[in-house]
Image (cartoon, rainbow, N blue to C red):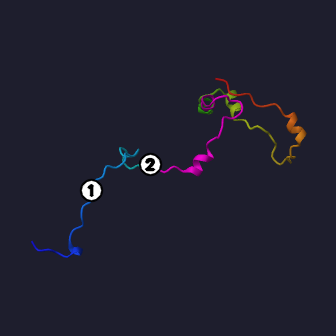
Amino acid sequence: PPTFPQRLQPPEKKKQTERKKRRDDDKKKVIISEKRQKRTANKYQVGDVPYPYTSREEYERALSGALGKEWNVSNAFRDLTRPEILVRPGKMIQPISKMAKKKATTQRAPAKF
């Protein structure tokens, strides 16, 4: 057989290496990004367990509870979604003083399960 110059020969075939299994291999028309987005992940993670909770499991259980009207009675839904501070629109908000901070010991009760 005639020998062709290198530029006219077909490219060499690469070996089939075993690739890592992806989460979207079995899903058609779906691409799941495998990259971890540190900025976004750190934004929504807490470093330690917030005050009323004593363990990580207790905190996660409180977060997993549904807040919607479909799963709670109307009074419970209103209490769970009410803001901490109520101010009428257009009213001036004065800065809080140090004495008022010390007096304000009333906190919302922790969720009951």
Is disc 1 placed on a helix, strand or loop? loop
Q: Which residue is mark 2?
A: 32
Q: Residue at x 54, y 51 (%)?
A: 37
Instruction: Tell me the quarter of the image containing the C terminus.
Output: top right
Asked if the magenta segment contains residue 5, the reply would be no
- Which amino acid type corresponds to the residue marked 1 in the rendered image? Lys
Is disc 2 placed on a helix, strand or loop? loop
Q: Is residue 29 rendered to the left or right of residue 99? A: left
In the displayed structure, 93 sits above or below 63; it is below
* Badge number at residue 15: 1
The furthest residue to the left: 1
- Which amino acid type corresponds to the residue marked 2 in the rendered image? Ile
Q: Residue at x 56, y 50 (%)?
A: 38
What is the magenta range? 31-60
Asked if the magenta segment contains residue 58, the reply would be yes
Q: Please provide percent x and percent y for residue 20.
A: 37, 47
Instruction: Tell me the quarter of the image containing the N terminus.
Output: bottom left
Q: Nearer the viewer, residue 53 or 32?
A: 53
Label 2 neighbour load within 10 Å: few <14, some 14-19, many 20+: few
Of label 2 and label 1, which has the lower sequence position?
A: 1
Q: Nearer the viewer, mark 2 or mark 1?
A: 1
Separation of residues labelled 2 and 1 (CA atoms): 26 Å
**Mark 2 and 1 residues: CB-CB less than 8 Å, in contact?**
no
Q: Please provide percent x and percent y for residue 77.
A: 67, 31
Q: Please provide percent x and percent y for residue 16.
A: 27, 53
* Badge number at residue 68: none
Q: Please provide percent x and percent y for residue 70.
A: 59, 30
In the displayed structure, 38 sits above or below 49; it is below
